[in-house]
Image (spheres, rainbow, N blue to C red):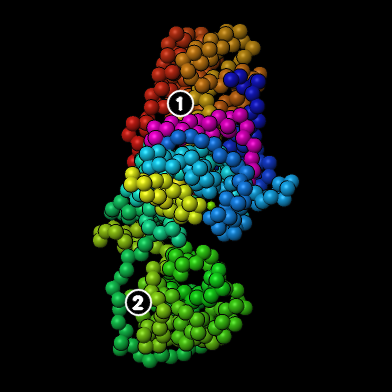
Amino acid sequence: MRYSQYLLPTLRETPGDADVVSQQLMMRAGMIRKVAAGIYDYLPLGLRAIRRMETIVREEMNRAGAIEVLMPMVVPAELWEETGRWQQYGRELLRLKDRKETDFCLGPTHEEVITELVRGTVRSYRQLPLNLYQIQSKFRDEIRPRFGLMRGREFIMKDAYSFDLDQAGVDAAYDRMYQAYRRIFARCGLNFRAVEADTGNIGGSSSHEFMVLAESGEDAIASCSHCEYAANVEKAECRPQPVVCCDDAPPLEQVATPGRKAIGEVAEFLGVPASATAKALVLITDGGEAVMALLRGDHELNPIKLKNVLGCAELEMATDEQIEKLTGAPVGYLGPVGAQIRVVADLAIQSGGPWITGANVSDAHLRNSVLGRDFTVERFADIRNVEAGDPCPRCAAGRIEMWRGIEVGHVFKLGTKYSAAMRATVLDDQGQERTLVMGCYGIGIGRTVAAAIEQNHDDKGIVWPMPLAPFQVLITLVNPKDETVRGAGEQLYLELQQRGVEVLLDDRDERPGSKFADADLLGMPLRVTVGSKALAEGAFELQERRSGARSLLPLAEAADRIAAQVRAALATGIEEGGDGR
Ligand code: ATP
Ligand code: MG
Protein backbone atom coordinates (compact mmCIF):
# COMPACT_ATOMS: atom_id res chain seq x y z
CA MET A 1 0.00 0.00 0.00
CA ARG A 2 1.22 3.45 -0.90
CA TYR A 3 0.89 5.93 1.94
CA SER A 4 0.22 8.79 -0.52
CA GLN A 5 -2.87 6.98 -1.83
CA TYR A 6 -4.06 5.65 1.52
CA LEU A 7 -6.52 7.03 4.08
CA LEU A 8 -4.29 7.42 7.11
CA PRO A 9 -5.09 10.60 8.99
CA THR A 10 -2.52 10.69 11.80
CA LEU A 11 -2.79 13.29 14.56
CA ARG A 12 0.12 15.02 16.29
CA GLU A 13 -1.95 15.96 19.33
CA THR A 14 -3.60 13.55 21.72
CA PRO A 15 -7.39 13.86 21.47
CA GLY A 16 -8.85 15.35 24.64
CA ASP A 17 -11.54 12.75 25.15
CA ALA A 18 -9.24 9.71 25.00
CA ASP A 19 -8.70 8.25 28.47
CA VAL A 20 -6.35 5.34 27.94
CA VAL A 21 -3.17 4.96 25.94
CA SER A 22 -4.57 2.45 23.47
CA GLN A 23 -7.47 4.74 22.64
CA GLN A 24 -5.18 7.76 22.29
CA LEU A 25 -2.80 5.88 20.03
CA MET A 26 -5.51 4.28 17.91
CA MET A 27 -7.02 7.70 17.31
CA ARG A 28 -3.68 9.38 16.69
CA ALA A 29 -2.58 6.59 14.34
CA GLY A 30 -5.72 7.06 12.26
CA MET A 31 -7.09 3.60 13.10
CA ILE A 32 -10.47 4.57 14.52
CA ARG A 33 -12.76 7.57 14.58
CA LYS A 34 -15.59 8.19 16.97
CA VAL A 35 -19.04 8.43 15.40
CA ALA A 36 -21.04 8.47 18.65
CA ALA A 37 -20.37 7.35 22.22
CA GLY A 38 -19.01 3.79 22.00
CA ILE A 39 -19.53 3.68 18.23
CA TYR A 40 -16.56 3.91 15.89
CA ASP A 41 -15.46 3.91 12.29
CA TYR A 42 -12.68 1.45 11.63
CA LEU A 43 -10.34 3.23 9.26
CA PRO A 44 -8.20 1.18 6.87
CA LEU A 45 -5.27 0.75 9.27
CA GLY A 46 -7.53 -0.13 12.20
CA LEU A 47 -9.46 -2.58 10.11
CA ARG A 48 -6.24 -4.31 9.11
CA ALA A 49 -5.32 -4.93 12.76
CA ILE A 50 -8.86 -6.16 13.44
CA ARG A 51 -8.66 -8.53 10.46
CA ARG A 52 -5.31 -9.90 11.68
CA MET A 53 -6.86 -10.68 15.04
CA GLU A 54 -9.85 -12.28 13.34
CA THR A 55 -7.57 -14.44 11.22
CA ILE A 56 -5.74 -15.77 14.27
CA VAL A 57 -9.05 -16.45 16.00
CA ARG A 58 -10.47 -18.16 12.91
CA GLU A 59 -7.42 -20.36 12.45
CA GLU A 60 -7.45 -21.49 16.06
CA MET A 61 -11.22 -22.00 16.21
CA ASN A 62 -11.14 -24.07 13.03
CA ARG A 63 -8.17 -26.01 14.35
CA ALA A 64 -10.15 -26.78 17.53
CA GLY A 65 -12.98 -28.17 15.43
CA ALA A 66 -15.41 -25.27 15.61
CA ILE A 67 -17.39 -24.35 12.47
CA GLU A 68 -18.05 -20.81 11.32
CA VAL A 69 -21.57 -19.45 10.80
CA LEU A 70 -22.98 -15.94 10.70
CA MET A 71 -26.13 -15.04 12.59
CA PRO A 72 -28.19 -11.88 12.23
CA MET A 73 -27.48 -8.84 14.33
CA VAL A 74 -31.19 -7.95 14.44
CA VAL A 75 -32.93 -10.58 16.53
CA PRO A 76 -36.68 -11.12 16.99
CA ALA A 77 -37.91 -10.60 20.54
CA GLU A 78 -39.86 -13.85 20.46
CA LEU A 79 -36.63 -15.85 20.78
CA TRP A 80 -35.60 -13.83 23.81
CA GLU A 81 -39.05 -14.27 25.29
CA GLU A 82 -38.58 -18.04 25.18
CA THR A 83 -35.70 -17.80 27.65
CA GLY A 84 -37.16 -14.93 29.66
CA ARG A 85 -34.22 -12.69 28.83
CA TRP A 86 -36.41 -10.19 26.96
CA GLN A 87 -37.65 -9.13 30.41
CA GLN A 88 -34.48 -9.84 32.40
CA TYR A 89 -31.69 -8.40 30.31
CA GLY A 90 -32.05 -4.79 31.36
CA ARG A 91 -31.04 -1.65 29.56
CA GLU A 92 -27.92 -2.91 27.81
CA LEU A 93 -30.33 -4.59 25.37
CA LEU A 94 -31.23 -2.18 22.58
CA ARG A 95 -34.84 -2.95 21.75
CA LEU A 96 -36.46 -1.75 18.53
CA LYS A 97 -39.58 -2.22 16.44
CA ASP A 98 -39.98 -2.83 12.73
CA ARG A 99 -42.64 -1.18 10.54
CA LYS A 100 -45.18 -3.76 11.67
CA GLU A 101 -44.51 -2.87 15.31
CA THR A 102 -42.87 -6.23 15.90
CA ASP A 103 -40.24 -6.21 18.66
CA PHE A 104 -36.60 -6.87 17.88
CA CYS A 105 -33.30 -6.31 19.62
CA LEU A 106 -29.74 -5.79 18.47
CA GLY A 107 -27.97 -8.95 19.57
CA PRO A 108 -25.63 -8.41 22.54
CA THR A 109 -24.88 -12.16 22.60
CA HIS A 110 -26.44 -15.02 20.67
CA GLU A 111 -27.40 -17.95 22.89
CA GLU A 112 -31.04 -17.75 21.80
CA VAL A 113 -30.34 -17.48 18.08
CA ILE A 114 -27.83 -20.33 18.03
CA THR A 115 -30.07 -22.56 20.15
CA GLU A 116 -32.90 -21.94 17.70
CA LEU A 117 -30.58 -22.79 14.82
CA VAL A 118 -29.44 -26.02 16.44
CA ARG A 119 -32.87 -27.19 17.59
CA GLY A 120 -34.10 -26.73 14.03
CA THR A 121 -31.23 -28.60 12.36
CA VAL A 122 -29.80 -31.18 14.76
CA ARG A 123 -31.86 -34.25 15.58
CA SER A 124 -29.49 -37.03 16.51
CA TYR A 125 -26.60 -37.59 18.91
CA ARG A 126 -24.65 -38.66 15.83
CA GLN A 127 -24.43 -35.00 14.80
CA LEU A 128 -22.66 -34.19 18.06
CA PRO A 129 -20.39 -32.81 19.33
CA LEU A 130 -21.04 -29.53 17.58
CA ASN A 131 -19.34 -26.19 18.12
CA LEU A 132 -20.48 -23.22 16.01
CA TYR A 133 -18.90 -19.80 16.02
CA GLN A 134 -19.25 -16.44 14.34
CA ILE A 135 -17.32 -13.20 14.20
CA GLN A 136 -19.87 -10.42 14.23
CA SER A 137 -20.78 -6.98 15.50
CA LYS A 138 -22.58 -6.96 18.81
CA PHE A 139 -24.50 -4.11 20.36
CA ARG A 140 -24.71 -3.48 24.09
CA ASP A 141 -26.03 -0.17 25.32
CA GLU A 142 -23.26 0.06 27.93
CA ILE A 143 -23.96 2.52 30.71
CA ARG A 144 -20.43 3.96 30.43
CA PRO A 145 -18.93 3.35 27.01
CA ARG A 146 -15.29 4.38 27.21
CA PHE A 147 -11.68 3.58 26.45
CA GLY A 148 -12.29 3.41 22.70
CA LEU A 149 -12.71 -0.14 21.40
CA MET A 150 -12.17 -1.49 24.90
CA ARG A 151 -15.72 -0.79 26.04
CA GLY A 152 -17.74 0.15 23.00
CA ARG A 153 -21.46 -0.11 22.45
CA GLU A 154 -21.08 -1.60 18.98
CA PHE A 155 -18.10 -3.97 18.99
CA ILE A 156 -16.84 -7.04 17.16
CA MET A 157 -16.94 -10.30 19.06
CA LYS A 158 -16.13 -13.88 18.26
CA ASP A 159 -18.75 -15.98 19.96
CA ALA A 160 -18.81 -19.76 19.91
CA TYR A 161 -21.38 -22.18 21.31
CA SER A 162 -20.85 -25.87 21.92
CA PHE A 163 -23.56 -28.53 22.00
CA ASP A 164 -23.11 -31.93 23.60
CA LEU A 165 -25.14 -34.83 24.87
CA ASP A 166 -23.84 -34.80 28.42
CA GLN A 167 -21.58 -33.21 30.99
CA ALA A 168 -18.52 -35.17 29.85
CA GLY A 169 -19.10 -33.79 26.37
CA VAL A 170 -19.26 -30.17 27.45
CA ASP A 171 -16.24 -30.70 29.73
CA ALA A 172 -14.21 -31.80 26.71
CA ALA A 173 -15.53 -28.94 24.54
CA TYR A 174 -14.64 -26.46 27.27
CA ASP A 175 -11.11 -27.82 27.55
CA ARG A 176 -10.62 -27.57 23.81
CA MET A 177 -11.78 -23.94 23.83
CA TYR A 178 -9.65 -23.15 26.87
CA GLN A 179 -6.57 -24.47 25.06
CA ALA A 180 -7.54 -22.67 21.83
CA TYR A 181 -7.84 -19.41 23.76
CA ARG A 182 -4.40 -19.86 25.28
CA ARG A 183 -2.99 -20.36 21.82
CA ILE A 184 -4.83 -17.35 20.42
CA PHE A 185 -3.59 -14.92 23.05
CA ALA A 186 -0.09 -16.38 22.99
CA ARG A 187 0.00 -15.95 19.21
CA CYS A 188 -0.99 -12.30 19.66
CA GLY A 189 2.15 -11.91 21.77
CA LEU A 190 0.15 -10.93 24.86
CA ASN A 191 1.04 -11.29 28.51
CA PHE A 192 -2.15 -12.84 29.83
CA ARG A 193 -3.60 -15.12 32.45
CA ALA A 194 -6.64 -17.37 32.57
CA VAL A 195 -8.51 -16.75 35.83
CA GLU A 196 -11.54 -18.29 37.49
CA ALA A 197 -14.63 -16.17 36.98
CA ASP A 198 -18.00 -15.79 38.62
CA THR A 199 -20.73 -17.94 37.11
CA GLY A 200 -23.61 -15.98 38.62
CA ASN A 201 -26.76 -17.97 39.12
CA ILE A 202 -25.80 -20.68 36.62
CA GLY A 203 -23.51 -22.17 39.24
CA GLY A 204 -20.42 -24.35 39.24
CA SER A 205 -16.85 -23.21 38.92
CA SER A 206 -16.89 -23.63 35.18
CA SER A 207 -15.95 -20.26 33.90
CA HIS A 208 -12.63 -18.68 33.10
CA GLU A 209 -11.78 -15.22 31.90
CA PHE A 210 -8.67 -14.52 29.89
CA MET A 211 -7.07 -11.40 31.23
CA VAL A 212 -4.42 -9.29 29.59
CA LEU A 213 -2.33 -7.82 32.41
CA ALA A 214 -2.42 -4.02 32.26
CA GLU A 215 -2.56 -1.21 34.79
CA SER A 216 -5.45 0.37 32.91
CA GLY A 217 -7.54 -2.82 33.16
CA GLU A 218 -11.04 -2.51 34.59
CA ASP A 219 -10.85 -5.89 36.34
CA ALA A 220 -9.03 -6.79 39.52
CA ILE A 221 -7.39 -10.21 39.61
CA ALA A 222 -6.25 -12.10 42.68
CA SER A 223 -3.56 -14.72 42.34
CA CYS A 224 -1.55 -16.82 44.76
CA SER A 225 2.13 -16.13 45.34
CA HIS A 226 2.73 -19.87 45.70
CA CYS A 227 0.24 -22.01 43.74
CA GLU A 228 -1.68 -21.77 40.44
CA TYR A 229 -4.75 -20.14 41.96
CA ALA A 230 -5.94 -17.05 40.07
CA ALA A 231 -9.43 -15.58 40.03
CA ASN A 232 -11.33 -12.44 39.23
CA VAL A 233 -11.87 -10.54 42.50
CA GLU A 234 -15.60 -10.83 41.80
CA LYS A 235 -15.15 -14.54 42.37
CA ALA A 236 -11.92 -14.99 44.40
CA GLU A 237 -12.66 -16.85 47.63
CA CYS A 238 -11.51 -15.85 51.10
CA ARG A 239 -9.92 -18.56 53.18
CA PRO A 240 -12.01 -19.03 56.33
CA GLN A 241 -10.13 -18.28 59.55
CA PRO A 242 -10.61 -20.05 62.89
CA VAL A 243 -13.73 -19.04 64.79
CA VAL A 244 -12.99 -16.92 67.87
CA CYS A 245 -14.95 -17.10 71.09
CA CYS A 246 -15.58 -13.85 73.03
CA ASP A 247 -17.32 -15.36 76.08
CA ASP A 248 -15.45 -13.34 78.67
CA ALA A 249 -15.91 -9.97 76.96
CA PRO A 250 -16.97 -6.99 79.10
CA PRO A 251 -20.62 -5.96 78.85
CA LEU A 252 -22.06 -4.03 75.94
CA GLU A 253 -21.57 -0.31 76.34
CA GLN A 254 -22.97 2.59 74.34
CA VAL A 255 -20.49 5.36 73.58
CA ALA A 256 -21.15 8.77 72.10
CA THR A 257 -19.57 9.24 68.67
CA PRO A 258 -20.98 12.60 67.64
CA GLY A 259 -20.71 13.23 63.93
CA ARG A 260 -18.49 10.17 63.38
CA LYS A 261 -20.07 8.17 60.60
CA ALA A 262 -17.28 6.76 58.48
CA ILE A 263 -15.47 3.70 59.83
CA GLY A 264 -12.15 5.53 59.77
CA GLU A 265 -13.56 8.40 61.86
CA VAL A 266 -15.18 6.08 64.41
CA ALA A 267 -12.04 3.96 64.77
CA GLU A 268 -9.83 7.00 65.19
CA PHE A 269 -12.19 8.62 67.68
CA LEU A 270 -12.32 5.47 69.80
CA GLY A 271 -8.60 4.74 69.39
CA VAL A 272 -8.96 1.32 67.76
CA PRO A 273 -7.96 -0.06 64.35
CA ALA A 274 -10.71 -0.23 61.70
CA SER A 275 -10.41 -4.03 61.92
CA ALA A 276 -11.92 -3.86 65.43
CA THR A 277 -15.13 -2.42 64.05
CA ALA A 278 -17.97 -4.15 62.22
CA LYS A 279 -19.82 -2.17 59.57
CA ALA A 280 -23.39 -2.71 58.49
CA LEU A 281 -24.63 -1.99 54.96
CA VAL A 282 -28.24 -2.16 53.91
CA LEU A 283 -29.10 -3.49 50.47
CA ILE A 284 -32.35 -4.09 48.65
CA THR A 285 -32.91 -7.14 46.43
CA ASP A 286 -34.82 -7.06 43.15
CA GLY A 287 -37.64 -8.71 45.11
CA GLY A 288 -37.75 -5.61 47.35
CA GLU A 289 -36.32 -7.34 50.43
CA ALA A 290 -33.93 -5.43 52.71
CA VAL A 291 -30.79 -7.20 53.90
CA MET A 292 -28.11 -6.03 56.30
CA ALA A 293 -24.60 -7.10 55.27
CA LEU A 294 -22.18 -7.14 58.18
CA LEU A 295 -18.46 -6.90 57.49
CA ARG A 296 -15.26 -6.13 59.32
CA GLY A 297 -14.73 -2.38 59.16
CA ASP A 298 -11.62 -2.60 57.00
CA HIS A 299 -13.15 -5.10 54.54
CA GLU A 300 -15.03 -4.38 51.34
CA LEU A 301 -18.38 -5.90 50.41
CA ASN A 302 -18.37 -8.08 47.30
CA PRO A 303 -21.87 -7.48 45.91
CA ILE A 304 -21.60 -10.37 43.45
CA LYS A 305 -20.89 -12.87 46.22
CA LEU A 306 -23.77 -11.46 48.25
CA LYS A 307 -26.07 -11.67 45.23
CA ASN A 308 -25.14 -15.32 44.78
CA VAL A 309 -25.70 -16.02 48.49
CA LEU A 310 -29.14 -14.40 48.38
CA GLY A 311 -29.98 -15.95 45.01
CA CYS A 312 -31.19 -12.67 43.58
CA ALA A 313 -30.51 -11.11 40.18
CA GLU A 314 -30.09 -7.51 41.30
CA LEU A 315 -28.95 -5.87 44.49
CA GLU A 316 -28.85 -2.16 45.19
CA MET A 317 -27.58 -0.10 48.08
CA ALA A 318 -30.50 1.27 50.08
CA THR A 319 -30.95 5.02 49.94
CA ASP A 320 -30.47 7.13 53.08
CA GLU A 321 -34.24 7.49 53.44
CA GLN A 322 -34.81 3.73 53.09
CA ILE A 323 -32.14 3.08 55.71
CA GLU A 324 -33.69 5.41 58.25
CA LYS A 325 -37.09 3.95 57.65
CA LEU A 326 -35.87 0.37 58.02
CA THR A 327 -33.55 0.80 61.00
CA GLY A 328 -34.66 3.97 62.70
CA ALA A 329 -31.09 5.24 62.58
CA PRO A 330 -29.31 7.50 60.15
CA VAL A 331 -26.56 6.18 57.87
CA GLY A 332 -23.29 5.80 59.76
CA TYR A 333 -24.79 4.46 62.99
CA LEU A 334 -26.24 1.13 61.86
CA GLY A 335 -25.46 -2.11 63.60
CA PRO A 336 -26.67 -5.66 64.06
CA VAL A 337 -27.66 -5.25 67.71
CA GLY A 338 -31.45 -5.12 67.72
CA ALA A 339 -31.61 -5.04 63.92
CA GLN A 340 -35.10 -5.65 62.56
CA ILE A 341 -33.99 -6.91 59.14
CA ARG A 342 -32.17 -10.11 58.23
CA VAL A 343 -28.43 -9.97 58.75
CA VAL A 344 -25.94 -11.78 56.52
CA ALA A 345 -22.44 -11.58 57.96
CA ASP A 346 -19.08 -12.14 56.40
CA LEU A 347 -17.06 -15.09 57.72
CA ALA A 348 -14.54 -12.72 59.28
CA ILE A 349 -17.21 -11.62 61.80
CA GLN A 350 -16.95 -15.12 63.32
CA SER A 351 -13.20 -14.84 63.55
CA GLY A 352 -12.93 -11.66 65.58
CA GLY A 353 -14.63 -9.51 68.16
CA PRO A 354 -15.85 -8.24 70.44
CA TRP A 355 -16.83 -5.60 67.91
CA ILE A 356 -17.49 -1.92 67.83
CA THR A 357 -20.79 -1.56 65.98
CA GLY A 358 -23.33 1.14 65.21
CA ALA A 359 -25.91 1.59 67.98
CA ASN A 360 -28.88 2.15 65.63
CA VAL A 361 -29.11 5.51 67.35
CA SER A 362 -27.89 8.81 66.01
CA ASP A 363 -24.35 9.81 67.13
CA ALA A 364 -23.64 6.60 69.05
CA HIS A 365 -21.80 3.30 68.70
CA LEU A 366 -21.58 0.19 70.85
CA ARG A 367 -18.42 -1.22 72.37
CA ASN A 368 -18.04 -4.95 73.09
CA SER A 369 -20.72 -6.24 70.72
CA VAL A 370 -20.45 -9.99 70.94
CA LEU A 371 -21.82 -12.37 68.37
CA GLY A 372 -24.38 -14.70 69.94
CA ARG A 373 -24.62 -12.64 73.14
CA ASP A 374 -25.57 -9.21 71.81
CA PHE A 375 -26.57 -9.90 68.27
CA THR A 376 -27.39 -12.79 65.99
CA VAL A 377 -26.85 -13.39 62.36
CA GLU A 378 -29.13 -15.28 60.01
CA ARG A 379 -26.32 -16.53 57.86
CA PHE A 380 -22.54 -16.47 57.58
CA ALA A 381 -21.01 -16.43 54.15
CA ASP A 382 -17.96 -15.30 52.25
CA ILE A 383 -19.22 -11.91 51.06
CA ARG A 384 -16.11 -9.73 51.02
CA ASN A 385 -13.43 -8.98 48.45
CA VAL A 386 -10.10 -10.70 48.93
CA GLU A 387 -7.20 -8.35 49.56
CA ALA A 388 -3.49 -8.43 48.91
CA GLY A 389 -1.79 -10.40 51.67
CA ASP A 390 -4.82 -12.60 52.47
CA PRO A 391 -4.01 -16.31 52.78
CA CYS A 392 -4.60 -18.26 49.56
CA PRO A 393 -7.91 -20.14 49.57
CA ARG A 394 -6.29 -23.14 47.84
CA CYS A 395 -2.87 -23.71 49.36
CA ALA A 396 -1.53 -23.25 52.86
CA ALA A 397 1.67 -21.53 51.83
CA GLY A 398 0.70 -18.65 49.56
CA ARG A 399 -0.55 -15.12 49.94
CA ILE A 400 -2.90 -13.25 47.64
CA GLU A 401 -1.35 -10.82 45.15
CA MET A 402 -3.45 -8.33 43.21
CA TRP A 403 -3.25 -7.38 39.53
CA ARG A 404 -5.21 -5.32 37.08
CA GLY A 405 -6.40 -6.95 33.89
CA ILE A 406 -8.41 -6.42 30.72
CA GLU A 407 -10.90 -9.22 30.08
CA VAL A 408 -10.36 -10.24 26.46
CA GLY A 409 -12.01 -13.65 26.48
CA HIS A 410 -14.50 -15.62 28.48
CA VAL A 411 -15.31 -19.35 28.45
CA PHE A 412 -18.39 -20.62 30.22
CA LYS A 413 -20.25 -23.89 30.77
CA LEU A 414 -23.90 -23.04 30.36
CA GLY A 415 -25.38 -26.44 31.10
CA THR A 416 -29.00 -26.66 29.92
CA LYS A 417 -30.13 -23.15 30.82
CA TYR A 418 -30.92 -22.19 27.22
CA SER A 419 -31.50 -25.60 25.66
CA ALA A 420 -34.07 -26.54 28.33
CA ALA A 421 -35.93 -23.23 28.03
CA MET A 422 -35.98 -23.52 24.24
CA ARG A 423 -36.47 -27.29 24.06
CA ALA A 424 -33.34 -28.03 22.09
CA THR A 425 -33.11 -31.79 22.27
CA VAL A 426 -31.67 -34.72 20.32
CA LEU A 427 -32.34 -38.44 20.33
CA ASP A 428 -29.63 -40.51 22.00
CA ASP A 429 -28.53 -44.01 20.96
CA GLN A 430 -31.50 -45.47 22.87
CA GLY A 431 -33.94 -43.27 20.98
CA GLN A 432 -34.48 -41.18 24.14
CA GLU A 433 -34.92 -37.43 23.89
CA ARG A 434 -32.08 -35.60 25.63
CA THR A 435 -31.66 -31.88 26.33
CA LEU A 436 -28.44 -30.53 24.84
CA VAL A 437 -25.67 -29.41 27.19
CA MET A 438 -24.11 -26.13 26.10
CA GLY A 439 -21.01 -24.03 26.52
CA CYS A 440 -20.32 -20.51 25.28
CA TYR A 441 -17.03 -18.86 24.46
CA GLY A 442 -16.43 -15.20 23.64
CA ILE A 443 -13.50 -13.08 22.53
CA GLY A 444 -13.61 -9.32 22.12
CA ILE A 445 -11.77 -8.73 18.85
CA GLY A 446 -11.43 -4.95 19.13
CA ARG A 447 -10.78 -5.12 22.86
CA THR A 448 -7.92 -7.56 22.27
CA VAL A 449 -6.32 -5.29 19.69
CA ALA A 450 -6.65 -2.37 22.13
CA ALA A 451 -5.21 -4.52 24.95
CA ALA A 452 -2.26 -5.41 22.72
CA ILE A 453 -1.53 -1.70 22.35
CA GLU A 454 -1.86 -1.16 26.11
CA GLN A 455 0.92 -3.72 26.51
CA ASN A 456 2.97 -2.70 23.52
CA HIS A 457 3.74 0.98 23.17
CA ASP A 458 6.31 3.58 24.15
CA ASP A 459 6.21 7.35 24.41
CA LYS A 460 6.52 7.69 20.63
CA GLY A 461 3.70 5.38 19.64
CA ILE A 462 2.54 1.84 19.06
CA VAL A 463 4.99 -1.08 19.06
CA TRP A 464 3.02 -3.75 17.20
CA PRO A 465 3.60 -7.41 17.93
CA MET A 466 4.22 -8.86 14.46
CA PRO A 467 1.07 -11.06 14.40
CA LEU A 468 -1.31 -8.11 14.86
CA ALA A 469 0.62 -5.46 12.94
CA PRO A 470 -1.50 -3.84 10.19
CA PHE A 471 1.63 -3.90 8.01
CA GLN A 472 4.69 -5.89 8.85
CA VAL A 473 7.11 -3.52 7.16
CA LEU A 474 7.13 0.21 6.58
CA ILE A 475 9.43 1.51 3.84
CA THR A 476 10.22 5.19 4.16
CA LEU A 477 11.55 6.98 1.09
CA VAL A 478 13.59 9.78 2.63
CA ASN A 479 13.39 11.85 -0.54
CA PRO A 480 10.88 10.38 -3.02
CA LYS A 481 11.86 12.95 -5.64
CA ASP A 482 15.32 11.40 -5.90
CA GLU A 483 15.10 8.89 -8.77
CA THR A 484 17.59 6.44 -7.25
CA VAL A 485 15.81 6.48 -3.90
CA ARG A 486 12.40 6.00 -5.46
CA GLY A 487 13.65 3.27 -7.81
CA ALA A 488 15.35 1.26 -5.05
CA GLY A 489 12.41 1.70 -2.66
CA GLU A 490 9.82 0.65 -5.26
CA GLN A 491 11.92 -2.38 -6.14
CA LEU A 492 12.07 -3.53 -2.49
CA TYR A 493 8.35 -2.82 -2.10
CA LEU A 494 7.62 -5.13 -5.02
CA GLU A 495 10.02 -7.86 -3.92
CA LEU A 496 8.63 -7.96 -0.38
CA GLN A 497 5.06 -8.20 -1.65
CA GLN A 498 6.12 -11.05 -3.93
CA ARG A 499 7.35 -12.82 -0.79
CA GLY A 500 3.99 -12.40 0.92
CA VAL A 501 5.04 -9.54 3.21
CA GLU A 502 2.51 -6.78 3.93
CA VAL A 503 4.22 -3.46 3.24
CA LEU A 504 3.32 0.18 3.59
CA LEU A 505 5.42 2.42 1.35
CA ASP A 506 5.78 5.94 2.67
CA ASP A 507 6.16 7.74 -0.66
CA ARG A 508 4.75 11.06 0.60
CA ASP A 509 6.48 14.24 -0.36
CA GLU A 510 6.96 15.41 3.23
CA ARG A 511 9.77 16.32 5.57
CA PRO A 512 11.74 13.24 6.63
CA GLY A 513 11.31 14.24 10.31
CA SER A 514 7.55 14.14 10.04
CA LYS A 515 7.63 10.80 8.21
CA PHE A 516 9.88 9.30 10.91
CA ALA A 517 7.53 10.58 13.62
CA ASP A 518 4.61 8.91 11.84
CA ALA A 519 6.65 5.73 11.51
CA ASP A 520 7.18 5.68 15.27
CA LEU A 521 3.52 6.42 15.93
CA LEU A 522 2.23 3.73 13.55
CA GLY A 523 4.65 1.23 15.05
CA MET A 524 5.14 -1.33 12.26
CA PRO A 525 7.63 -3.90 13.56
CA LEU A 526 10.23 -3.43 10.81
CA ARG A 527 11.13 -0.14 9.18
CA VAL A 528 13.30 0.24 6.12
CA THR A 529 14.72 3.66 5.41
CA VAL A 530 15.69 4.29 1.81
CA GLY A 531 18.07 7.24 1.68
CA SER A 532 20.77 8.33 -0.74
CA LYS A 533 23.55 7.98 1.83
CA ALA A 534 23.04 4.26 2.56
CA LEU A 535 22.19 3.60 -1.08
CA ALA A 536 25.57 5.00 -2.07
CA GLU A 537 27.03 2.17 0.05
CA GLY A 538 24.72 -0.32 -1.65
CA ALA A 539 22.43 -0.76 1.37
CA PHE A 540 19.07 -0.05 2.99
CA GLU A 541 18.84 0.82 6.63
CA LEU A 542 16.67 -1.59 8.67
CA GLN A 543 15.35 -0.62 12.06
CA GLU A 544 13.37 -2.73 14.52
CA ARG A 545 10.60 -0.71 16.13
CA ARG A 546 10.76 -2.51 19.47
CA SER A 547 14.49 -2.50 20.17
CA GLY A 548 15.41 0.43 17.98
CA ALA A 549 18.32 -1.70 16.69
CA ARG A 550 19.58 -0.56 13.28
CA SER A 551 21.51 -2.50 10.69
CA LEU A 552 22.52 -2.10 7.04
CA LEU A 553 21.11 -4.58 4.56
CA PRO A 554 22.88 -5.10 1.23
CA LEU A 555 20.36 -4.31 -1.54
CA ALA A 556 20.43 -7.75 -3.12
CA GLU A 557 19.75 -9.61 0.14
CA ALA A 558 17.26 -7.20 1.68
CA ALA A 559 13.96 -8.75 0.54
CA ASP A 560 14.92 -12.30 1.51
CA ARG A 561 16.28 -11.34 4.89
CA ILE A 562 13.30 -9.17 5.82
CA ALA A 563 10.82 -11.81 4.66
CA ALA A 564 12.62 -14.44 6.77
CA GLN A 565 12.52 -12.18 9.80
CA VAL A 566 8.76 -11.60 9.37
CA ARG A 567 8.10 -15.34 8.99
CA ALA A 568 10.09 -16.16 12.11
CA ALA A 569 8.24 -13.54 14.17
CA LEU A 570 4.85 -14.78 12.96
CA ALA A 571 5.67 -18.34 13.96
CA THR A 572 6.30 -17.52 17.64
CA GLY A 573 3.57 -18.68 19.92
CA ILE A 574 1.99 -20.93 17.29
CA GLU A 575 3.48 -24.12 18.65
CA GLU A 576 3.83 -23.64 22.38
CA GLY A 577 0.52 -21.95 23.16
CA GLY A 578 2.02 -19.63 25.73
CA ASP A 579 2.09 -19.60 29.48
CA GLY A 580 -1.34 -18.22 30.33
CA ARG A 581 -1.50 -19.90 33.74
P1 ATP B 1 -17.36 -6.92 30.75
O1 ATP B 1 -17.40 -7.50 32.14
O2 ATP B 1 -16.05 -6.31 30.41
O3 ATP B 1 -18.55 -6.06 30.44
P2 ATP B 1 -18.71 -9.20 29.76
O4 ATP B 1 -18.53 -10.18 30.86
O5 ATP B 1 -19.96 -8.45 29.64
O6 ATP B 1 -17.46 -8.16 29.79
P3 ATP B 1 -18.93 -11.27 27.77
O7 ATP B 1 -20.40 -11.19 27.75
O8 ATP B 1 -18.28 -12.44 28.39
O9 ATP B 1 -18.34 -9.90 28.40
O10 ATP B 1 -18.41 -11.04 26.28
C1 ATP B 1 -17.31 -11.74 25.72
C2 ATP B 1 -16.17 -10.82 25.37
O11 ATP B 1 -16.61 -9.70 24.60
C3 ATP B 1 -15.50 -10.19 26.57
O12 ATP B 1 -14.55 -11.08 27.11
C4 ATP B 1 -14.86 -8.95 25.97
O13 ATP B 1 -13.60 -9.28 25.40
C5 ATP B 1 -15.81 -8.57 24.87
N1 ATP B 1 -16.66 -7.44 25.28
C6 ATP B 1 -17.70 -7.46 26.13
N2 ATP B 1 -18.26 -6.24 26.24
C7 ATP B 1 -17.55 -5.43 25.41
C8 ATP B 1 -17.65 -4.05 25.06
N3 ATP B 1 -18.58 -3.27 25.59
N4 ATP B 1 -16.75 -3.54 24.18
C9 ATP B 1 -15.80 -4.33 23.63
N5 ATP B 1 -15.66 -5.63 23.91
C10 ATP B 1 -16.53 -6.19 24.79
MG1 MG C 1 -20.49 -6.53 30.09
Query: For residue 171, which numbered disc appears in the image?
Result: none
Residue type (three-letter) at the residue carrying disc 1: Glu
The magenta-colored residue range is 38-65
- At 45% from the left and 41% from the top, the residue drawn is 122
Instruction: Name the foreground residue: 459 vs 69.
Output: 69
Which quadrant would residue 247 be assigned to in this image?
Answer: bottom left
Q: Are dots 2 and 1 in contact, CB under 8 Å?
A: no
Label 1 element class = strand
- Which percent across, then down, holds residue 504? 56, 21
Label 2 element class = loop
Marks 2, 1: nearer the viewer = 2
Q: Is residue 463 above or below residue 303?
A: above
- Which percent across, then down, holds residue 153? 61, 47
Residue type (three-letter) at the residue carrying disc 2: Gln
N-terminal of the two: label 2 or label 1? 2
- The answer to whether residue 219 is seen in the rendering is no
Q: Main secondary structure of the magenta part?
A: helix
Which residue bears the numbered disc 1? 544
- Which percent across, then down, holds residue 461? 54, 35
